[in-house]
Amino acid sequence: MPIDSPFTNKTVVFTGTLSCGLTRLQAAQLVVNAGGHTTDSVSKKVDYLVLGLQDASKVRDGVHSGKMLRAAELRDAGSAIELLSEDDFLRMLPT
């Protein structure tokens, strides 16, 4: 397990479609390889929400996914969920 990974012992959730060519399953495996774990829903236990491309027909307000809205609610309540762009997520992975 990488000691210097920002994902070590962290929980990651993905929303939207990843444009880098990875499936969510492949991206989730990269998180596991970096010492973290993934889940499908946003809760107080989530450390990072990775923002992929949103399909406007599938999001609640035409812009934000349900996961993004839930993360915003939790952040407003004091949770430390960090929103990551797909590029930031990829940069944070151990090489």
Image (cartoon, rainbow, N blue to C red):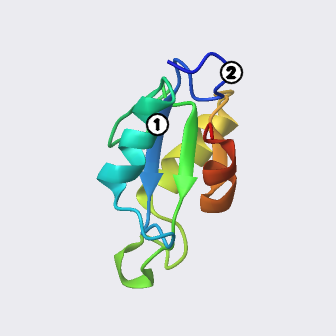
Three-letter code for the amino acid on which mark 2 is drawn: Asp
Three-letter code for the amino acid on which mark 1 is drawn: Val
Residue 33: image quadrant is: top left
Q: Secondary structure at mark 1?
A: helix
Q: Position of residue 59 (x, y in %)?
A: 41, 72
**Residue that appears at 41% across and 31% down:** 32
**Residue that appears at 48% across and 23% down:** 35
Q: Nearer the viewer, residue 37 or 44?
A: 37
Instruction: Name the residue that disc number 1 marks.
Output: 31
- Disc 1 crowd rating (10 Å Cα; few below 14, some 14-19, many 20+) is many
**2 sits to left or right of 66:** right
Residue 60: image quadrant is: bottom left
Which of disc 2 and disc 1 is earlier in sequence?
2
Q: Position of residue 86 (x, y in %)?
A: 60, 60
Instruction: Name the residue that disc number 2 marks.
Output: 4
Q: Position of residue 82 (x, y in %)?
A: 66, 40
**Residue that appears at 44% across and 58% down:** 15
Q: Position of residue 36 (x, y in %)?
A: 47, 26
Q: Nearer the viewer, residue 17 or 80?
A: 17
Q: Nearer the viewer, residue 23 or 85?
A: 23
Q: Secondary structure at mark 2?
A: loop
**15 sits to left or right of 4:** left
Give the CA separation, mark 1 to mark 2.
Answer: 13 Å
**Residue that appears at 55% across and 75% down:** 63
For the image, the number of numbered tags is: 2
Contact, mark 1 vs mark 2 (Cβ under 8 Å): no
